[in-house]
Image: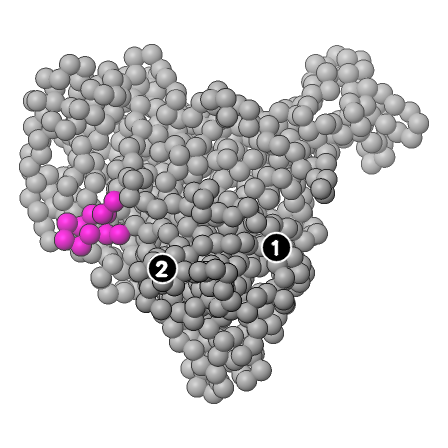
Amino acid sequence: MNREPDNAIARFDGPTKVSGKALYAGDQFQPSQLYAAFVTSPISCGRVETVSSVSALAKPGVVRVLTAADMPRVHSALQQVTVPPLASRFVPMQENEIMHEGQPVAIVLAETLEAAEEAAKLVQVRYSRSAFSVADTSPPAAVMPEKGNYSKAGPLAFAKGDTGAAYAAASIKLTATYTQPSRHANPMEPSAILAVWNADKLTVYDSVQHLPAVQNALAAVFGLPSTNVRVVSPHTGGGFGAKAFIWSHEILACIAARVVQRPVKLVLNRQNMYSIVGPQPQLTQQVSLGASADGRLQSLEHKVSNVTGQTDDYVEFATASSRAFYACDNIKVSQQVRRGNMVLPTFMRSPWDGPGSWGLGAAMDELARALKIDPLDLRLKNYAEVEPESGKTWSSKKLREAYSLGAERFGWRTRPKGGTRDGHWRIGCGMADCSQGQARFHSTARVRLRADGTAQVESSFCDIGTGPATIFPQIAAEVLGLPPQRVKALAGDTNLPYSGPTYGSGTTISTGAAVQLAAKRIREQLARLAAWPSADIELRDGRVLLGKESRSIEELLKSAGLAEIASDGAFDLPNGAPVDMGSPQYPARSFGAIFVEVGVDDELGLLRLRRATGVYSAGKIINPRTARSQMIGGIIWGWGMAAMEGSSFEPTLGRWYSKDLAGVPLPVNADIPSEIDVAFVDEFDSNAGPIGAKGIGELGATGVAAAVANAVFDAIGLRVRDLPITPSKLLGA
């Protein structure tokens, strides 16, 4: 058995979580708190005419029923908060207008959760209905500038060369349409918040992925300085994008707490999670590829449309993949939206490149079949040595090495012929590219080194289960020469130094760099205390070494009369930007390749994942154990996207068919084989950041859906272009 490297350590927060000691937002408690339950609209478009709360207020334990008439209007400063991080500018219960089914129209506040939920059923609301629009069937439309704030994330259209002429002249042409349904994140912990006012100061315990964004948005809601709002979130029970932005329930709970002058706790139920927090949107992708006879791409055109709400234009930039994956002189992409009465969609693991790698990855396999070229060889022929969109050199890219290692570990070149039988299963193999744009965020951190040889890392990052509370101590420990177990992380509080968001695969690269710098400054302080040149000292096991001389940290600090020394570090972006997608000179991406083998029972329409190999080019891997775990989770997530998941919209009533876990097929242990093989190529990306790492959190979920669909075709010759690949589609073979 191969020994794990020394930096492959178990997560420090594991025992706290598995023992039930970790307190999530829904576990928080304040004396005199009230429990909130929403009354939500059963209609998709119209107005609230009257609300009668007489029966609800008669229920024991019910304190108040709030309607739009009771709610103070949000401060105009909220209009200055951008979308994102504000999920939508539309705040329910400010007026009586209904924009989608499930929208809150009243809030019941009670001494117990049971009383609040029962009373919510007794509130009588009379509505006037209006005709509603179903986004699924709405025609694609251009993004409206005044509503399309999400378009700031990338160009709505991009073109270089002449795709029309190049496509017409190509030896081999392919045009196909690929679709995927809307999908809801179903985190173990639903979104939850506890709002507590003390005069004009607000403290919230919230289930979020970026604490300072919530702090600033809630301050704007009430026209307060951000220092008057404190956000606490030491543990977030899964986010996956659903908790990335500020949703209406957070605003409404804080307003309710101010109205009644008591703490208010609101935990969304599963139905609320489908109607108050947005899904990844349904997408339609048309991909056109033209190639020469030897497989060189001559033309690449990618048109995408996604569903969105009526309040804002959320754009799912699936075309990001076509601007970055393959070398081609003629590229043209465009994005449109299809509006309807639904809650605004949002990020979901993996945004942009997850959907884009599905459409483009499947199309590349179809092109390889038409050319009679191995799909891997087709990708090698069209390897992008520089970023196709800008022509700039990548910050780093070792995808060739990932291809080679992945093919070797999987046995791609010696794989069984497509359609080979194993009992009643027909075997197929497929592969696809994995890639994710690299977000970087302004972040800060503080490191404290104590005289007893222990240290503490402080930053407002939140833990969504990806292991930052282990990785950041490892980064500090490496600089300070301490065992990682002697470094602790204090996080999840806006009273701590500012950390960027925990999404976009940017946490490690950004906050990790700030931690590293703070730790280096601690080294410099120790060198000054020892009166030694800082460049020459070595730290090991709590001692400062210079050649044969040695002094303990405890000795140095005590002689200076110090119990501890502390230093701050920051990861700053060019021109003071809060976020970018790589340095101006070097666009940054993480890369990889996924190889899968599936079994298809063509008589019963069953699809099974038999094995998978993913190899990735993602910079320095800080902790191989947590990294491997993340990639396995991403591959499983991608399998769910490929074979199981989808949220269906009922067009007659204008609501989701299934709004709880009972109707959501998700991968379980029985669906996932033990043979999920993950590896990383040796890489250090100094251009992406000083720690040499790049993001991996969302990378593992990219490419998987395409690889699975490609393997299904290899097994039974059926090309499925509409996800998920369910039995009814397989029986079409």
Q: Main secondary structure of the magenta part?
A: loop
Q: Secondary structure at mark 2?
A: loop
Q: Where are the magenta residues, as a range?
A: 648-658
Tell me the crowding category of disc 2: few under 14, some 14 to 19, or many 20 or more residues within 10 angstroms, Cα based.
some
Residue 593 appears in the rendering: yes
Find the distance from the CA under tag 1 to the CA under tag 2: 30 Å
Q: Is residue 563 magenta?
A: no
Which residue is pictured at 28% across the width and 44% down the height? Answer: 663
Q: Position of residue 259 (x, y in %)?
A: 23, 22
Q: Quadrant of the C terminus?
A: bottom left
Query: What amino acid type is highlighted by mark number 2?
Result: Gly
Q: Residue furthest front?
A: 423
Residue under the point 31% across and 19% down: 263
Residue 262 rendering spot, x and y as whole percentages: 28, 17
Q: Position of residue 9 (x, y in %)?
A: 65, 34
Secondary structure at badge 1 equals strand
Q: Say which residue label 2 marks.
A: 605
Identify the residue under disc 1: 615
Which quarter of the figure has residue 559? top right
Using the image, determine if residue 722 lies above or below residue 57: below
Looking at the image, residue 29 lies above or below residue 310: above
Instruction: Give the amino acid at mark 1.
Output: Val
